[in-house]
């Protein structure tokens, strides 16, 4: 009888999990800020012109942050489904960035290229041989 040795989580996957948690925390914090500042005339003017829209964006940001946190927990536990889901979202992010680059006439070049590079690095960390062994167990 052979027993398989559990594969420990690779450093790259741990880094992805940490970055995912940071994203979740920032999203929740931003959402709470918007909810609390929804009646601030400066915030209203900068974002949409309507208090209800600011509050809705804040609530949405909190919900998205909670979902991102759940994804981080699943990635940490080795959910292959979530690895695939995150990978698809990263590919969509890259496609969106390419669309921005093609239509923005050079504006946003720096931030957009940084976004593309980060997405590619995260994809690479999620699909190394060590990461694949971790997610397949």
Image: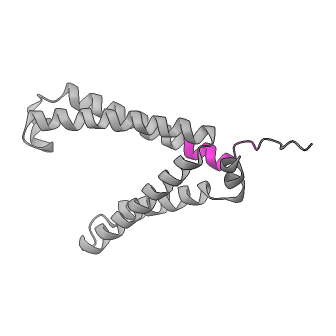
Q: Position of residue 92 (x, y in %)?
A: 39, 61
In the picture as drawn, the residue positioned furthest to the right comes out as: 1
> What residue appears at the point 59 percent right and 49 percent down from the top-left corner?
80
Pick the front one: 86 or 4: 4
Please tell me whether residue 12 belongs to the stretch shown in magenta.
yes
Q: Nearer the viewer, residue 11 or 133?
A: 133
**Span of residues in magenta:** 7-17
> Relative to residue 49, is residue 111 drawn left or right?
right
Figure quadrant of residue 4:
top right
The picture places residue 33, in percent across and down from the top left corner, at: 26, 29
The image quarter containing residue 89 is bottom left
Instruction: Decide which of 81, 86 is in the foreground and name it.
Output: 81
**Picture coordinates of residue 126 (x, y %)?**
60, 54
Q: Is residue 55 above or below residue 96?
A: above
Answer with left or right where residue 32 lies relative to residue 94: left
Q: Which scheme is used to colour this image of the protein? A: one colour
Residue closest to the eye, 50 or 7: 7
Would residue 64 be found to the left or right of residue 72 on screen? left
User: Relative to 112, is 3 above or below?
Assistant: above
Residue at figure coordinates x 18%, y 28% from the top left: 37
Report the predominant secondary structure element of the magenta stretch: helix
Vertical order, 108 against 82 (above or below): below
Q: How many marks?
A: 0
Q: Residue furthest top?
A: 36
Q: Residue furthest front?
A: 1
Look at 22% across and 38% down and name the residue there.
Answer: 57
Q: Quadrant of the N terminus?
A: top right
Left of 11 or right of it: where is 36?
left
At 13% from the left edge and 43% from the top edge, which residue is drawn?
Answer: 46
Q: Where does residue 67 sit, x and y in percent of width and height? A: 41, 37
């Amino acid at each position: 009888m052979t027993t398989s040795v559990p594969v420990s989580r690779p450093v790259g996957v741990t880094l992805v999990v940490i970055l995912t948690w940071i994203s979740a925390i920032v999203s929740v914090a931003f959402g709470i800020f918007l909810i609390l500042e929804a009646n601030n005339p400066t915030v209203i003017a900068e974002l949409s012109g309507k208090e209800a829209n600011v509050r809705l964006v804040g609530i949405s940001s909190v919900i998205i942050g909670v979902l991102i946190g759940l994804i981080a927990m699943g990635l940490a536990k080795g959910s292959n489904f979530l690895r695939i889901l995150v990978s698809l979202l990263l590919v969509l992010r890259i496609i969106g960035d390419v669309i921005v680059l093609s239509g923005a006439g050079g504006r946003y070049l720096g931030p957009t290229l940084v976004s593309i590079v980060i997405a590619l690095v995260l994809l690479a960390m999620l699909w190394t041989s060590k990461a694949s062994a971790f997610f397949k167990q």
